[in-house]
Amino acid sequence: MKIISDKNKLTKIVYNETNLGFVPTMGTIHNGHISLIKRCKNECKKIIVSIYINKPQFNRKSDFKKYPRNLRSDISKLKKLKVDILYLPITRQIYSNGPDKKIKINSFEKKLCGQNRPGHFKAVVDIINRFIKIIYPKKIYLGNKDMQQLILIKDFVKENYPKIKIIGCKTIREKNGVALSSRNYLLSLKEKLTVFDYVKATFIVPLVIAICYILRALFPELSDEALAAIGFILVIGLAIFLGWPRARSKTDVTKRKTYIGYRRKSRKHGGKTGRELKAEAKWNTSY
């Protein structure tokens, strides 16, 4: 695997490549990234993976500083995956004249998450645009997890680079249903449990609505009040059955900390840093 930081050198190397795949990342490689890389390898002759934590897309400086960084571990994983080129951009080359805050993207950027993250999606599209000008890949692979981001990038690339395809790939989740994300390593135990409860809720509500529609079709004589009562009972029943919401006792938290501590201790002689151990410590909410 070639590791390249100079954009001019990279441009020369890939200039004649006709079937080049690109997977942009911000590092802390997890199974979600790995699934993108594997698909890219299956569909393209050569593959480039970038690791670059793009400062302009962070709305708070503290978030940028806290973002997990595990370059040594990432390089090891990418070598095992037989990635052709790892691109580690130099900021002064990428942003020689600063970010393009006037870049034109779809107005959808101001909806949903964009309402609370001004400038975020423009910065994301801006960095993708800069990577394209350096690499000019045939295909770019992104996760469906960040759906709004994916839609905006697809729209921009379709309009400005019609020969390049944006490939949206399946979201990879942990066993508890939470989508894999590098940011998850920053969550406290309490925050992870809260996210897990939210994921359960997103499954329960659509299921109950579907059941109510079926009941309406089977029993048209049922009143709206009766359906509402049945729906309420179903929500409560399923929530209790799935253990949501669940009171988090001090004993529960202690058990999880003890488990994670045991996992760290068992890897003590594995030659890994504390940060890497923390990132790899298995988290499972079933206890």
Image: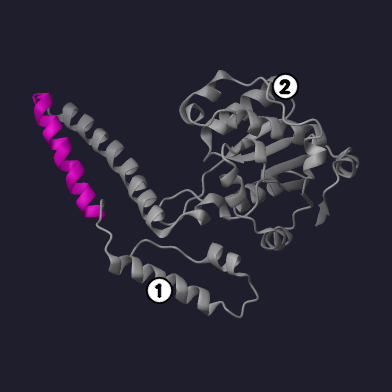
Q: Which residues are magenta?
A: 220-243
Question: Where residue 48 appears, x then y in whole percent?
Answer: 76, 46
Which residue occupies the foreground of this view, 68 or 174?
A: 68
Residue at 46 percent across and 76 percent down: it is 262
Q: Which mark is residue 227?
A: none
Quarter holding residue 203: top left
Marks 2 and 1 sit apart, C-alpha to C-alpha, by: 53 Å
Residue at 67 percent across and 63 percent down: it is 73
Which of the image's four quarters has the N terminus? bottom right
CB under 8 Å between discs 2 and 1:
no
Is residue 92 visible to the viewer in this orientation of the structure?
Answer: yes
Q: On the image, numbered disc 2 is attached to which residue?
A: 160
Which residue occupies the foreground of this view, 259 or 209?
A: 259
The amino acid type, in three-letter code, at marker 2 is Asn
Q: On the image, numbered disc 1 is attached to which residue?
A: 258
Query: SS at mark 1?
Result: helix
Residue at 80 percent across and 32 percent down: it is 133
Horizontal side of residue 204 vs 232, given as left or right:
right
Quarter holding residue 120: top right
Quarter holding residue 118: top right
Residue 222 part of the magenta segment:
yes
Which residue occupies the foreground of this view, 106 or 21?
A: 106
Q: Work out whether 91 lies above or below 82.
A: above
